[in-house]
Image (cartoon, helix red, strand yellow):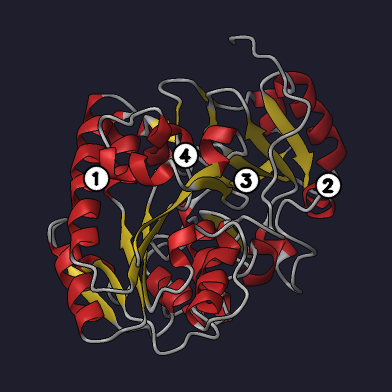
Amino acid sequence: MPEAETPADPLLPEYGGACITNVVPGLFAALAGGAAPDWLPGPVTGARQVVLLVLDGLGWGQLTARPRLAPTLAAAAGAGRPITSVAPTTTATALTSITTGRPPADHGLLGYRLAAGEEILNVLRWTLGSRTGGDARGRMPAGDVQRLPPFPDAPAPVPVVSRVDFAGTGFTAAHLGSAPLHGYRVLSSLPVEAGALLDAGAPFVYAYYDGIDKVAHGNGLGAHYDAELRDVDRMVAELADRLPGGAVLVVTADHGQIDVGPWVELLGRDVMAMVHGFSGEGRFRWVHARAGATDDLFDALVERYGATTWVRRRDELVADGWFGGPLAPGLEQRLGDVALVPHAPLAFADPADTGENRLASRHGSLTADELLVPLVALGGG
């Protein structure tokens, strides 16, 4: 195993300040003419309309390392800043924190795959694994799993611009509720849909694009990623050009990325003898201990992986504020007993989720490349 220097502590989300949890509430305050957070981009002040565009998988580090490929976003980044995502730095958790304005400890979608009794709920696909599998919408209605409303205190119903494929899915219902979806099929249609909503007078539009994340997972942070970023930057420029007077485009992301490649760890037989199962994902892997084995399992994982990974008990993560506060009642059972959160470029495999092993670039941990995301604005005036 390659050696890695152990950072003293992970970066933690700034739940009380410049964090994705506070972007939507801050933008609503600005639209209402109230006191908005001083970390919001300057053009937001005095805006009459706002489009919030979330670019899945675009970290601050990845953007600022490629200014020539993304001149529109890079120029805006010069007057913007990085903010933090949440823990874990994964889409299911982060998007729900953006739309509800609340930390994971409150909304309860605490990862990509969550324990649901003896089964595992894949939050993005809204399927149950292990014994029964299949569509979980009937057995686990989204409104029962995630009860907080999206876009609280919105000045008007918030229209959502997102891929038409996401309409009607369990995760869409969980993090967007009944918000009206204006679907697009290809990237070039996103500015058309958002622009039409602004022209119709919508004070706030939420838009989402997932292509950067898909390309990073499939191909890593190389030539394919660069090509996708170029196209996304052109789309952002087109959307900015469509803004009516007094409208502002705010761009952020749910998490960043880190290339992992083939370095995927499969726990050995001696450790697996103490393991009941797994949840989470490769860079925020929850290990569920067999009855009475938690202490021995923790010690074994620290000894074996402490040089490359933050190994933490569940109670430690909650007490240290990783999820933004004490867990709401009933949420602890969704997590495992010990978390493996690598700071080195590696992932931990779950034998029940072999598809994840093919990912080239990943996220989930609390390194700077994964936690820091852009917050920039275009337009205004």
Q: Within the image, what quadrant is residue 53 found in?
A: bottom left
Residue 182, given in percent of the width and then of the height, sits at 23, 77
Mark 4 lies on a secondary structure that is helix
Q: Quadrant of the N terminus?
A: top right
Going from N to C along the chain, the mark reached first, 4 or 1, is 4
Mark 1 lies on a secondary structure that is helix
Does 265 sit left or right of 155 as displayed? right
Going from N to C along the chain, the mark reached first, 3 or 2, is 3
Q: Mark 2 and mark 1: span between their CA atoms?
A: 40 Å
Q: Quadrant of the C terminus?
A: bottom left
The residue at 47%/48% (across/down) is: 80
Q: Mark 3 and mark 1: span between their CA atoms?
A: 41 Å
The amino acid at mark 3 is Gly
Work out whether residue 174 can be spotted.
Answer: yes
- Sort mark 1 into few (<14), some (14-19) or many (20+) by Cα contacts within 10 Å: some
The residue at 37%/83% (across/down) is: 179
- Sort mark 4 into few (<14), some (14-19) or many (20+) by Cα contacts within 10 Å: many
The residue labelled by disc 1 is 233
Q: Mark 4 and mark 2: span between their CA atoms?
A: 28 Å
Closer-to-camera residue (128/193): 193
The residue at the far bottom in this view is: 156
Circles 3 and 2 in contact, beta carbons < 8 Å:
no
- Sort mark 2 into few (<14), some (14-19) or many (20+) by Cα contacts within 10 Å: few
Residue 277 badge: 3
Which one is closest to the eye, mark 3 or mark 2? 2
Residue 60 badge: 4
